[in-house]
Image (cartoon, grey):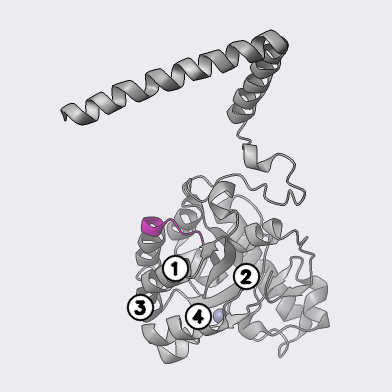
Amino acid sequence: MGISSKSFSKKPVREESALTATLRRIDIRFPWLKIVGVVVLGLIVIMDLFGLTISRIGDPGDKISIAPMARHVKITERVLEGKKLVALTFDDGPSAETTPVLLNTLRERDVPATFFMLGSRARNNPDIVKKVKEEGHEVASHTMYHQNLIRIPASAAAADIDEAKGILKSILGQDVSLTRTPYGNVNDTVRGFVGTPIILWSVDTLDWKIKNTDSIVGITMSEVSDGAIILMHDIHPTSVEAVPRLVDTLRDAGYEFVTVSEMAEMHGIKLANGVSYYSL
Ligand SMILES: [Zn+2]
């Protein structure tokens, strides 16, 4: 104790005097430096107040401009810088049994996801739909009744898409901006009237079929890459159970999570209506 306090008390004094002497020399030779220093410091403080970071100055890409989400305050541009990005997507819900469990997991791990909901299920679970949105996730359409849109008359397909959009808008108070067509099936007719970008996937976990955590994690890790869109279904307990390990494993491999719209924004991709996207 005595030794360490001695060595600590000596060191700063020596450094301070050397520093003071240096500063005095600089002050004599460059008296204007003090004013420049004050101005620079002032600018840094002002930029900090407006949420800008020093690392962003002169960033030529400047594609990292996402405001932090309401709940996921830790998922900010600063955390995402230098990370590979993935979008977890959950189809066919919401389910009163499994979706709330998934929301807990995502909240605990501070992971935003994108939910492609069926209008028919959303209508029966409006509070869950609202909660998904409120917790910082993206809510999108998976149509009304999960029909194979390229096998039914165009008028029926258009009606199905419109009905789902209407239900989700009535619950959320705003239009959904993305659609995932059931089974990923889409043709030119559907592209013509879907009215949003069509978001498909690059990693099919086959969670609905295999219903096994090891398999979900294994398939994902062998197929994932920066910009991947991972397909899962929040109506199966096994899929929801797989999420904690999936998230941790992806993070260990240098990935961070964003919603589909955020990933497009961060990767500088302008999504267009009627166009299919498999990764971003
Ligand atoms: Zn589906």
Q: Earlier in the sequence, mark 3 or mark 4?
A: 4
Amino acid under disc 2? Asp
State yes or no: residue 4 in magenta.
no
Residue 147 in view, yes or no: no
Residue at mark 3 to residue at mark 4: CA–CA distance: 21 Å
- Label at residue 221: 4
| Disc 2 target residue | 226
Q: How busy is the neighbourhood of tag 2: few (under 14 within 10 Å), some, or many (20 plus)?
A: some
Determine whether label 1 and label 2 are within 8 Å by CB. Answer: no
The range drawn in magenta is 107-112
What amino acid type should be assigned to the residue bearing mark 1? Answer: Asp
Between 199 and 213, the one lying in front of the other is: 213
Tell me residue 122's x, y (percent). Answer: 51, 65
Which of label 2 and label 3 is nearer to you? 2
Residue on which the image places disc 1:
252
Residue sitting at x 71%, y 79%: 157
Beta carbon of the mark 2 residue lies under 8 A of ligand 1: no
Residue 209 in view here: yes
Which residue carries the number 3 mark?
237
Q: Which quadrant is the N terminus positioned in?
A: top left
- Cα separation, mark 1 vs mark 2, equals 14 Å
Amino acid type of disc 3? Pro
Q: Horizontally, is 96 left or right of 154 in the view? A: left
Q: Quadrant of ligand 1?
A: bottom right
Separation (CA) of disc 1 from disc 3: 24 Å
Q: CB under 8 Å between callouts 1 and 3?
A: no
Q: Is residue 65 above or below residue 184?
A: above
**Measuring 57% from the left and 83% from the top, which residue is drawn there?**
223
